Image: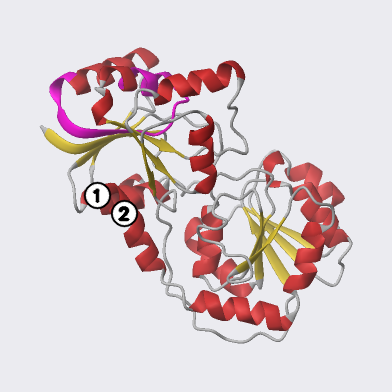
Amino acid sequence: MIYNKIIITNLPAFYKINLFNKIAEKEKIFVVFTGRTAELRNNDFFKKELIRFNYIDLRDKSKIRRHLFLLKLFYTVNYKELILGGWDESLLWMAAFISPKKKNSVLVESSIYESKTKGVKGKIKSFFLKRAHCAYVSGRSQIQLLKALGFSGAIKKTKGVGLFNIQPQPSFERREMVKNFLYVGRLSPEKNLPDLIRCFNELPNLNLHIVGFGPLDKDLKAIALQNIKFHGSVNNQQLHLYYQDFDVFILPSTSEVWGLVVEEALNNGMPVIVSNKVGCVEEVVIDHYNGLVFNVDVKYSLQDTILQMTELNIYNRLRYNISTMDFSKIATEQVKVYTE
């Protein structure tokens, strides 16, 4: 059996499946899903029935059987490129050292903001990267990480971490009021949600809608006032209804590898507010073009940016610019990075 690419990654998230399906239309690929994850997700986050490529899911296999399968794979299959989905589990290390360096690429989604580049952890990552001749990165913060770790191989910028479910782009319609803001994501510490809630507690004439679940659920509800509503978990196929009903999307994270939800919001015509630590800033979100960027390290920057977004001339200009974006073209360009 001959494959253009063997890809080793953790779980079959819908946006990865969408990406791999598109790659598989152009090349023959085999994907190994290792099954490793530390986060709870929506029930529809993994959609195996959508897969249109050869794969194996190692989630239910023992650690020994996972490693034996990988060993057998490399000695029975011919391939042109191995794409390693990170460096944080033993299967990836095993593959990196069995496979020749000239065939090895690494998919880097960690960023300079949350990754250790010094000390023992930094040296371990640098050592792993010496086994790769190429790196696929989503954006600038990943490039900065590679440079900090001394990576000297080729770098290919994908401008994305996968393909979301693209909706028909809404036509521009001017709005006469900006009142309803939306957050979609996990309720976890790095999302900076306590600060977001404090901002809206001080802005009682504006509403914040929170979609998602996570470890901070009870704590956040305890400090939220009446203008803040928690919607809980929402099926991914229904999210576009929230994006299109509300006015502004906010992602205030202190650390965010990329921010796929930002792309989803923009695709549904929604201006966005994101922190300067969100990975898709500059690659997808252009400050004062399709969204506003605030400095997460500056006090009141988030609140000032929220108020700025309520100015109708600013808001409607952003909304118009978003209506001209071609998300199908953006998706095609991401696939090209892997196939050309």
Q: Secondary structure at mark 2?
A: helix
**Drawn side of residue 279 relative to residue 335, left or right:** right
Q: Residue at x 16, y 37 (%)?
A: 3
Q: Secondary structure at mark 1?
A: helix
Q: Residue furthest top?
A: 64
Q: Quadrant of residue 327?
A: bottom left
Q: Are marks 1 and 2 in contact (CB under 8 Å)?
A: yes
**What residue is pinned by disc 2?**
335
**What residue is pinned by disc 1?**
339
Q: Amino acid at mark 2?
A: Val
Q: Is residue 175 above or below residue 40?
A: below
Q: Nearer the viewer, residue 151 or 104?
A: 151
Q: Amino acid at mark 1?
A: Thr
Q: Is residue 213 above or below residue 154?
A: below
Q: Position of residue 47 (x, y in %)?
A: 38, 47
**What is the spatial separation of the Cα atoms under label 1 and label 2, in whole angstroms?**
6 Å
Q: Point out the stretch of residues depicted in magenta.
A: 75-95
Q: Position of residue 200 (x, y in %)?
A: 82, 61
Q: Quadrant of residue 22?
A: bottom left
Residue 239 can be seen, yes or no? no
* The stretch drawn in magenta includes residue 291: no
Q: Nearer the viewer, residue 104 or 200?
A: 104
* The stretch drawn in magenta includes residue 86: yes
**Drawn side of residue 25 relative to residue 208, left or right:** left
